[in-house]
Amino acid sequence: MTSTAPGTTLADWLAAQDLRPGLADTVTAIAAACAEISAALRTAPLTGLTGVAGSTNVQGEAQKPLDILSNDLFIKHLAKVPRISSLISEELNQAHHFPIQDDTADLIVACDPLDGSSNIDVNVTVGSVFSILAGGRDALLQPGTAQLAAGYTTYGGSTNLVLTFGKSVALFTLDTDDVFRLADPAITVPVETAEYAINSARQPYWDAATTRYVEGCLAGEAGPFGKRYNMRWVGSMVADVHRILMRGGVFLYPLDSETAAKGGRLRLVYEAFPMAMIVEAAGGAAITGPQRILDIAPREIHQRVAVILGSKAEVERIAKLYAEAG
Ligand code: AHM
Ligand code: MG
């Protein structure tokens, strides 16, 4: 079996890649954490892992038992890889620095262990998002272009792992024996789309470019874009991005008048950066509105950002509206 044949195990596929030391082990550890998270989600209503945990994270949001468990599973599995220096996580106020086992520890992982918190208890697809950087514990803040790898998992009808090292994007599915197997060696995002995703309840706060874009979509064939659109919004970024990877589309969480003071809604380092790297590697585009996401230099680990990503021609259409808005 060649390393790109459907059914190839993640381990065999990784072994066939030309990766720097420690990178395959890091991806393997993340995949193991995700397989355990998937198992915990499958039985959560029976095991009492639903509801809120009574604590809040650094964003001031209520943590759920599964948020905490997922974070613990990332730490448990990453601790087995001596080359990992640090973990940045949505659920940890400060970066977690692993005990120095090896003075070559030169990899950093950033993750949202369980994205889509509001969908956990209603059995709607949630996921994990991760980014891998080169560097020791003092190199946490790097632009998105510095990422070595990025990926996410979706926990839905199937558990999928989407992974890129920057050139192409591979899709693995968790098989019934708990092994990730290759389902598609090279996913590409269609350039054109007529499907958009936005939380339209936030319309009163939108900026001029977003308002013009959505008005244009709603106007259909008679409007400025000359085509009829469909709208889909899951509310878990992983699920919305996965749909875009599978059939195209555009996802918007723009800077609006309510989120502007915080810098946006979504997190730069462990949500926007990995998703932007994946979408670009699949042939799509990812911007804040005026700027390419991957070019941003973060100032802090929990920084927030506006996110507009997906099919290239549609993201360019939105970029033009931002340019015109000045
Ligand atoms: P989370 O990391 O706390 O789950 O928040 C991120 C989620 C995204 O998955 C989703 O796109 C967005 O927040 C939805 O936010 P809202 O429902 O507040 O508009
Ligand atoms: Mg999240």
Image (cartoon, rainbow, N blue to C red):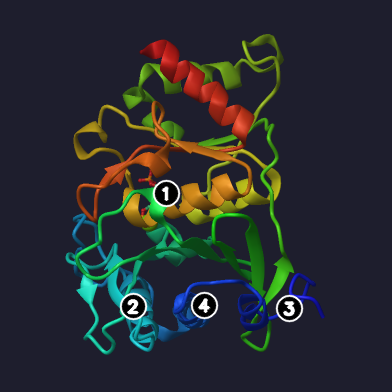
Residue 255 vs residue 109, the one in the foreground = 109
| Quarter of the image with the N terminus in it | bottom right
Mark-to-mark CA distance, 2 and 4? 12 Å
Mark-to-mark CA distance, 1 and 2? 20 Å
Mark-to-mark CA distance, 1 and 4? 20 Å
Mark-to-mark CA distance, 1 and 3? 29 Å
The tag on residue 24 is 4
Identify residue for label 1. 145
Tell me if residue 2 can be seen: yes
Image quadrant of ligand 2?
A: bottom left
Label 3 element class: loop
Tell me the residue at 48%/60% (across/down): 150
| Amino acid type at image mark 4 | Ala
Identify residue for label 3. 8
Earlier sequence position, callout 4 versus callout 3: 3
| Image location (x, y in percent) of residue 98 | 24, 81
Earlier sequence position, callout 2 versus callout 4: 4
| Amino acid type at image mark 1 | Thr
Say whether marks 2 and 3 touch (CB < 8 Å). Answer: no
Q: Is residue 103 above or below residue 165?
A: below
